[in-house]
Amino acid sequence: MPPRLFKDVGFVAIVVAACIGAMVYYSMTIVWPTLIGTVYTPDVIEIGWQSSVVGGGVLLGQLVGGFAITYLPKVKWQMIILSVLSTAFVGSLAALGPDTHTFVITMGTLGCFVIGWIDNITFPGVTLVIEPQDIGLATGVLGSIRALGGAVAQALYVSILTNKVTKYMPEYVAPAATAAGLPASSLPQLFQGITLGNFTAVPGITPQVIAATGIAVRDAYVTTFHYVFYASKFCTLNSILHTR
């Protein structure tokens, strides 16, 4: 990567905006099915349909962005407004709860739509700030950094998800299960049953304990996803700062 490319402030701003958009998109492809499956529905068909929010929203945004960059003026202001909107839509997902299914789908679709629009501005936008002989090089550098950002975000979000679930699962499940009548000595087997999706080997298990455990597991994931989307909000705020 030639250092001279990064002396151009416009190019750096475009790279940062594209990278952060990719971080949100690539991480959502991992996080979103888990969110739907653990908080809202265990039905694999429903999870599949509702996971199309990510890819479908981005593709729709790219379609609209293709027309926008042609017919709408003030591309820089488009980027600033879209970055603000992405922060609002994706960041608002941190307010998710067990009863906010429609809100989550709506905000997820709008957030991915905006990210797709940003994508379709950043790649053609390189041609506006780089000398003609460097357009191919600059586009390749942009694509490489964008892919790297997406990979880093996937690792970061999965790490947050894994660490927070490990922390909150015992905090939520243990008191709920014992309050429903499960002996404390059976908690290790209960957590194994949660992992396997089968509670038949848990001593003292009852339908009431299973129901209480299911609610506690859902609540543990809800709290976990709050932190995941806090991280998303931080990323998109950085995009606003750089597009300005």
Image: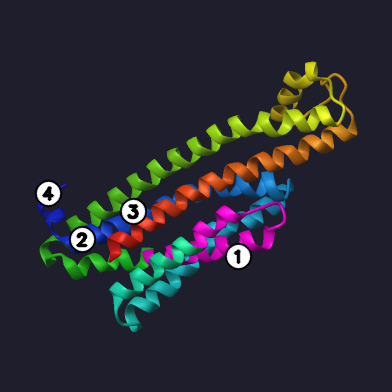
Q: State how far apart marks 4 and 1 are (Cα).
A: 41 Å
Q: Kindly identify which numbered label has been placed on residue 93.
A: none
- Seen at 45% across and 54% down, the residue is 233
Which label's residue is closer to the chain start, 4 or 3? 4
Q: Residue furthest top?
A: 185
To which residue does mark 1 refer?
106
Q: State how far apart marks 2 and 4 are (Cα).
A: 12 Å
Residue numbers of the magenta segment:
89-118
For disc 2, the neighbor class at 10 Å (few under 14, some 14 to 19, many from 20) is many
Q: Amino acid at mark 4?
A: Pro
Residue 106: image quadrant is bottom right
Q: Amino acid at mark 3?
A: Cys
Q: Is residue 19 left or right of residue 175?
A: left
To which residue does mark 3 refer?
19
Residue 135: image quadrant is bottom left
Which label's residue is closer to the chain start, 4 or 1? 4
To which residue does mark 2 refer?
11
Residue 191 rendering spot, x and y as whole percentages: 71, 25
Front position in the image: 116 or 211: 211
Residue 200 position (above or below residue 172): above
Which label's residue is closer to the chain start, 2 or 3? 2
Residue 171 position (above or below residue 234): above
- Seen at 58% across and 46% down, the residue is 225
- Seen at 45% across and 67% down, the residue is 85
Residue 192: image quadrant is top right
To which residue does mark 4 refer?
3
Q: Amino acid at mark 1?
A: Thr
Which label's residue is closer to the chain start, 1 or 3? 3
Secondary structure of residue under mark 2:
helix
